[in-house]
Amino acid sequence: MTELAVERWGDSGPLIVMVHGSLSSAARAFSEQRVLADDYRIIAPYRRGYPPSPATDRIDPDRDAEEIAPLLGSGAHLVGTSMGGVVAMRAAALVPDAVLSLTVIEPPALPNAVGRPAADRLREALRVYYKEHGEDEREAFVRGFLRTLDISPDEIPSPLPPLVAEAVRNLRTEHPWDTGVPVEKLAAAAFPKLVVTGGGTPGLEDVGDALAEQLPARRVLFDGSPHAVQRIGDPFNAELRSFLAAAEAGTQ
């Protein structure tokens, strides 16, 4: 039984498990998806290290995947954003028979895009950034981290609220240049896959293209969207609804 705290939205319909990324939380990351609870049951766990789930001294995507997998029960759609997308893909590889479909949003699966120039540059830039700035004060670290991803740090509040400061502490224990996913296992699984990006980080666009080829997966670009593409709301939700419906009908 998982120890994770979860948000639960909706009383009936197919199950969706939604996995948040590194600088967010279950409720905040998927606030725009609560409207899907009219037709789906949604479980959005707080990954270990993100209150009210248990604390941790370091983030471990493999442990996260092992804790997410039981939430799928006998069958669920799986959605993950950013590092939550890496976790979702690793969880799907653990229990492929429990996955109805897999949707990932700008996952930093950079090792899976080796040889693609923008992904290679981002991978090296992150490695260097952590080496040179890993001990920086938390607010300075997260702002520099986002700039490395070509993401504006303007939404980061100053001073950092306690929950954000804890998320940054978690972020500093990650190794985002080394968070690959088992594409061979995922490619062998029958469930449909969807890869979504927002166009803002060239290295993550390379990752999206690589995953679309390797899994293989449907590839959707919402150009001009934030890194957390799901926060655009209606356009993303319409695409997700269509994809889930096709998966359930066996036409995807």
Image (cartoon, rainbow, N blue to C red):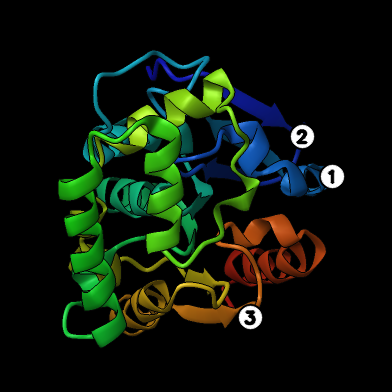
**Identity of the amino acid at label 1?**
Asp
Q: Is residue 171 left or right of residue 28?
A: left
Q: Is residue 70 visible?
A: no
Which numbered disc covers residue 201? none
Of badges 3 and 1, nearer the viewer stands 3
Within-10-Å neighbours for mark 3: few <14, some 14–19, many 20+: few
- Residue that numbered label 2 is attached to: 10
Q: Secondary structure at mark 2?
A: loop
Which numbered disc covers residue 38? 1
> In x, y percent, where is residue 110?
26, 67
The residue nearer to you, when weighing 24 against 141, is 141
Q: Quadrant of residue 226?
A: bottom right
Q: Quadrant of the N terminus?
A: top left
CA gap, disc 3 to disc 1? 28 Å
The residue nearer to you, when weighing 207 against 244, is 207
CA gap, disc 2 to disc 1? 6 Å
Of badges 3 and 2, nearer the viewer stands 3
